[in-house]
Amino acid sequence: MNMVSESIVKDMSLAPNGHLKIDWVKEHMPVLNRIRERFEREKPFAGLKVAISLHLEAKTAYLAKVIQAGGAEVTITGSNPLSTQDDVCAALVEDGIRVFAKYNPDPAEYKEHLIKTLETRPDLIIDDGGDLVSILHSERRDLLGQIRGGAEETTTGILRLKALEKEGKLEFPMVAVNDAFCKYLFDNRYGTGQSVWDGINRTTNLVVAGKTVVVVGYGWCGKGVAMRAKGLGAKVIVTEVDAIKAVEAYMDGFEVMPMSEAAKHGDYFVTVTGNRDVIRKEHFEVMKDGAILSNAGHFDVEVNKVELEALSKSKRTVRKDIEEFVMADGRKLYLLAEGRLVNLAAGDGHPAEIMDMTFALQAVSLEYVNKHYQSIGKRVLNVPYELDEMVARYKLEALGIGIDKLTDEQKAYLDSWVE
């Protein structure tokens, strides 16, 4: 089949640069390389179609190639309009993967790309934020037929899946990859922590040391963002709605207060909640002149852009990925990357070594669903611990790190109720 004619990409002439990007991340993803070697031998996806919706950059592209190496016919689209890299898309098409994605499509094009991906009638899916699942369970239920199951990447997507499951409407099994130890402990914390500040710093070119950073939400992503802000020399304030997480933030050494108060102090704001309108009208009204707003949650609803624009008397783009909103009293507030994921819309996303573990989990989770979908049932399931542990073990081996093993006597002691 001719993937060029079947795909929608911006410019095939960009492919050489895309290949260089993919080759670079491949060299830094030893766990995924090891899984690819097995997939090439065993072909666990032979004869199957796989549809992927993820942030379409080099690391994701390499995951698609690993799934392809397992025998699958792969179709991929982006999960965010501003995170797609056109050169990577072109390179994937040359590698025999069908692509429906361009950087910054309008909303209608973005939706069209998702639907075209599903119209290939996949057997398995990998989703990020739940867009594929949402379409399949709403306007395109006609495409549900042969889907065996899939895997979900993010907190936001898992919330949507669990809502479907709770209502008894989920039509196939989905693995909650985001909830695996090797995902949230490393990807969410260290990956988000580093990549958010990579995106903010390259976009603003301003100092962080000495500034006040307000981190909105103290889940694993928020922990990483706060930790890295502290490392850059910032004073950090955390806002939360969960009392337990608020105590944790306090004991981690951060100030904790309501957003109504934190809004008065912040120089930088980073939202990481998965919810909507966590920064809104009453907060914009008390912010300092020059405050910088950014989001690291999946959808661009955490900072209320409608209310921000309504409060402003003028708006302009002052630098790539920075919009300036001038308030009626002359204060200027700055929004990064249209309120979309700042680490991907204004950066390259998580480091390759971090995504190595996450995408290894995606690959083996998809394999697990394919083997067991008939017995799993229509539910959201956690990544089996043995797969999580295997990925961690592969990572340690790639790093040249050894760990201890329990002796038989120690195992017996732990399994016994007597001393």
Image: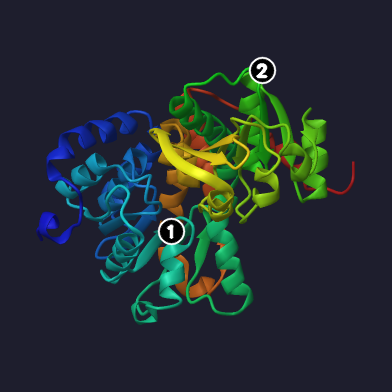
The N terminus, quarter of image = bottom left
Tag count: 2
- Extreme-right residue of the structure: 419
Q: Is residue 335 above or below residue 165?
A: above
Q: Could you tell me how far apart the alpha carbons at marks 1 and 2 are, in whole angstroms?
A: 39 Å
Residue 267 in the figure: left or right of residue 96: right
Foreground residue among 119 and 371 = 119
**Relative height, residue 205 to residue 176 (above, below):** above
| Left or right of residue 112: residue 367 | right
Colour mapping: rainbow
Reply above or below: 69 against 34: below
Q: Measuring 60% from the left and 62% from the top, which residue is drawn there?
A: 159
- Disc 2 on helix, strand or loop? loop
Q: Amino acid at mark 2?
A: Gly
* Residue 383 visible to an observer of this rendering: no
Badge 1: few (under 14), some or many (20 or more) residues near its Cα, within 10 Å? many
Element at badge 1?
Answer: strand
Left or right: 83 in relation to 261 = left
Residue 356 occupies quadrant: top left
Q: Amino acid at mark 1?
A: Asp
| x then y, percent, for residue 89 | 24, 46
Q: Is residue 83 visible?
A: yes
Q: Within the image, what quadrant is residue 108 found in?
A: bottom left
Query: What numbered label is drawn on residue 23?
Result: none
**Residue assigned mark 2:** 210
Say which residue appears at 82% left-offset and 32% top-offset. Answer: 251
Residue denoted by label 1: 127
* Percent position of residue 222, x then y: 64, 39
Sequence order check, earlier mark of 1 and 2? 1
Q: Position of residue 315 (x, y in %)?
A: 46, 42
